[in-house]
Image (cartoon, rainbow, N blue to C red):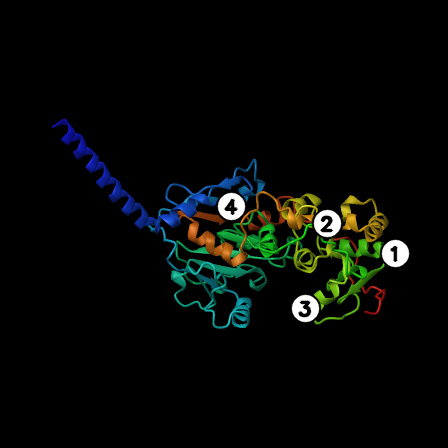
Amino acid sequence: MLFRRYTYKIVLILIWSVVFLWWYTTRHGGLDGVLSDHSTQIRNDAGPLLPDTTGCVPNIAADPSVDSSAKFYSVWKDSVKDVQKREGIIRKIIFWTKLWKKHLNVFMPGKEGKLCPTLPQCIFTTSAENLKNADAVVFENSQLPGTYIKSEMPLTRSPHQQWIWFISECPNYLTIDLNSYSGVFNWTITYRTDSDVSGAWGSLHMVYSRLKGADLDPNTDYSVGKTKLVVWFISKCSSRAQRILYANELIKHIHVDIFGKCGRIVCEKQDFACTVQYIRQYKFYLAFENMKCKEYITEKFWRHALTNNVVPVVLGAPKKDYEYLTPPNSFIHVDDFESPKALADYLKLLDTDSEMYNQYFKWKTNPPKSIPLDNGVWCNLCRKLIRICPDTRKMYTNLDKWYRGENNDQCVPLRNGTYHEVQFASNTNDL
């Protein structure tokens, strides 16, 4: 009799377990989805965030003592009754501003706005049809009015919708009154690591993903075949930019081939294949940013230099930002030298010592132990929309202070003086 009672209890427990498992996996879209959600870390400045027990990632207010920018936005739980979307449900992202209509039509013909093919749950469109059902609306900064005008924005705004401010340039290029947009945007897409969605020009994940599966020889001599020393492609020639002052002094001590609007034009602006053809002949590329801003590392570093096996010589963000965001020992920072002449002497030394030069390529076969996930801006956005808890909300209450810094300290100010375009004297060898 006692045995039967125990057997009966065990059967009831098993039945209850099966029912619970069925309910749980049905709610979360299968065990695979649940396990993948809980095994993936999403990092912010305050450290790794793990999904909560519902399988979604909440917007958690950062600690102002750790992240000083946290005082410029609010995070709260919404009372809106909304059901968490499963991973298989489509997310609709609308590009509101006109710039993206050309982008989608030219670069994505016939792909129905699938800017992230690896995550088919997201559809990107410029059509405002069914705007109220969109999960996110993206506003590109350069297309926004100088001050907030309600009539220029969507007339309706669903409670669950994320309005996203997208900018790829640094604060010194801002031409709009961001104060007037306070209380408008929920998320940001910028190059900075404290953005809600990463829109960086490049990343460790992107770089090492391209190298995955490549049969790299750690003893490769990357100086072979490079017949020239230093090259610089530059199109913005403001006399007030820090890089112009530095370059003017540098070229007194080492030969630099200067191409583009500020030197000799050899390639059409959009002809990157032509640009690459020139860059690969050189050992060093001047990846001088037009502004010195924290974490501002653009295509000059990632696309022009690093992917073409040329050592980038960098001027722009602080050295610690390059050390944190780029492959280890992959660059030469001007701040390590007391003068442009000292830098020139060091580049000449590397030119004569292939062993020293090749040290700047060891990163290819020695990746960091931990690499944050980054599949490109639109996949990053799609992933966040899939993972975010539907009842957590965020709003930027002072977007201007968040982006410029509380004391306008995100960027080094431009040099004083009258603006004029600089044209470098032709010091370029015939190619």
Count residues near mark 4 (Cα–Cα under 10 Å), then give few for <14, some for 14-19, many for 20+. many
Circle nearer the N terminus (4, 2): 4
The alpha-carbon separation of the residues under discs 4 and 3 comes to 42 Å
Quarter containing the N terminus: top left
Location of mark 1 (residue): 252
Q: Of discs 1 and 2, which sits in the foreground? A: 2
Q: Mark 3 points at which residue?
A: 273
Task: State whether residue 18 is above or below residue 167.
Answer: above
> Please, is residue 4 above or below residue 388 in the view?
above
Q: Judge whether 296 appears above or below 142 on screen.
A: above
Q: Residue at x 59, y 62 (%)?
A: 142
Label 1: how many Cα within 10 Å (few below 14, some 14–19, many 20+): few
Percent position of residue 232, x then y: 76, 61
Q: Earlier in the sequence, mark 3 or mark 1?
A: 1
For this rendering, which residue is in front, 41 or 296?
Answer: 41
Q: Residue 302 carries which label?
A: none
Q: In this view, does 183 lie to the left or right of 173?
A: left
Q: Name the residue under label 4.
A: 73
Q: Which of marks 1 and 2 is nearer the N terminus?
A: 1
Residue type indicated by callout 3: Ala
Residue topped by disc 2? 360
Tag 2 secondary structure: helix
Amino acid at the residue labelled 4: Tyr
